[in-house]
Amino acid sequence: MAQGQFSHATLEEVKRALSKAGPFLKVLVGAAIFAWMAASGKLDLAQIAKGFTHWPLMLAILGLLYCQIGITAWRWKLLLRVQDVPLPFRLAWGLTMIGTLFNVVIPGAVGGDLIKGYWITRAAPGRRAKAATSVVMDRVAGLIGLLFLGAVMVLTNPAETLRNPATRSLGALTVAGVLGGLAGLYAALFAGGRLSHWSFLPGLARNMFSALHEYRQKSSVVLIALAVSALNQSMTCCSYYLALRSTGVAGMPVGQFFLIVPLGLVTSAVPISPAGIGVGQAAFFALFQIVAPAYASVGTAAFTVMQAMSILICLSGLFWYISYKHVELASA
């Protein structure tokens, strides 16, 4: 019995140690991938340095990224209003900036969502499930908007999409991603009301399904959020295009561009390393090798340039994190 207790206690200690070491290990993984790509010549540091010298383009990228944060904050405010959580735009902006800060601190591009969810549920203690559901909806809308933009360009550039089996597979993956995302989203919205009455589910789950039902009743808000997401992600693609220009690329075909960028950005959001460092570079290099091998090195360098500008924006969220004051939001 004592031996069993000892083994159980040891296992728990190992789990806790791995949990604490997880973020550090993810940083190491991202840094190792980045270093390996630079050492192997897949990532040209000279091209990256060249990109940073074009300061007008760097300022334009920063401006686009800040505009995106403003649009994202407005979209989240809209989704919260459906859940009877009246968040002023100033606070929506501040919490969104805090979220971007933690996108660097916590591995992956979804780490900031966890922090936003924490702060908004504190601000609306009586509507925690509804507030948390708005964060999930905001992230889902953003991903669907990105894939939708890619799918539209894939379908309007059939010659590029059907060029070879690899590009056909990428095009099919993009279209399937947006169709699957939309199907899953609307299935959850339509089933939310019924699932919220299933007594064997935990209370939090029932409350979140009930919150999803609120979006079904105001489906126009969901459509607006998706449209805004597509606009927002088009600005991301513009930022990447400017980064490409800074590294000397001016004539990349549109069809190839949109086969690569949406999938590359989605992959960089996988929570493996902070801000997608290393993971994003590997994803973009692999996609360029499939679609446009001649641009593989410079395209990966361009992503790194845009990523550096994004990290700079994220770090500016420290101001809002330090100055944030807790408030409790009244019902709308």
Image (cartoon, rainbow, N blue to C red):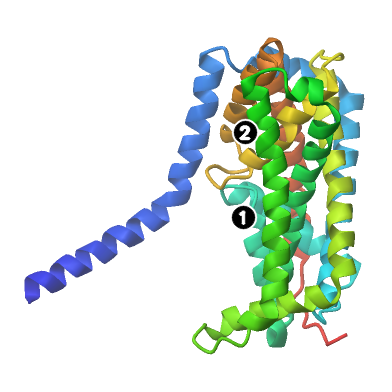
Q: Nearer the viewer, residue 222 or 318?
A: 222
Q: Is residue 119 left or right of residue 42?
A: right
The kind of residue tagged 2 is Gly
- Residue drawn at the location 67% of the way across and 42% of the way down: 266
Residue at the farthest top position: 294
Residue 252: x percent and y percent?
82, 16
The kind of residue tagged 1 is Gly
Mark 2 vs mark 1: give the one in front: 2
Q: Quadrant of residue 153?
A: top right
Image: 237 above or below 327? above
Q: Nearer the viewer, residue 323 or 177?
A: 177
Q: Nearer the viewer, residue 267 or 242?
A: 267
Q: Identify the residue under disc 2.
A: 280
Query: Mark 2 or mark 1: which comes first in sequence?
Result: 1
Image: 229 above or below 205? above
- Residue drawn at the location 72% of the way across and 52% of the way down: 100
Q: Identify the residue under disc 1.
A: 111
Describe the element under mark 1 as helix, strand or loop. Answer: helix
Q: Is residue 122 visible?
A: no
Residue 166: x percent and y percent?
62, 23
Q: What is the quadrant of the N terminus in the image? A: bottom left
Q: What is the quadrant of the C terminus in the image? A: bottom right
Describe the element under mark 2 as helix, strand or loop. Answer: helix
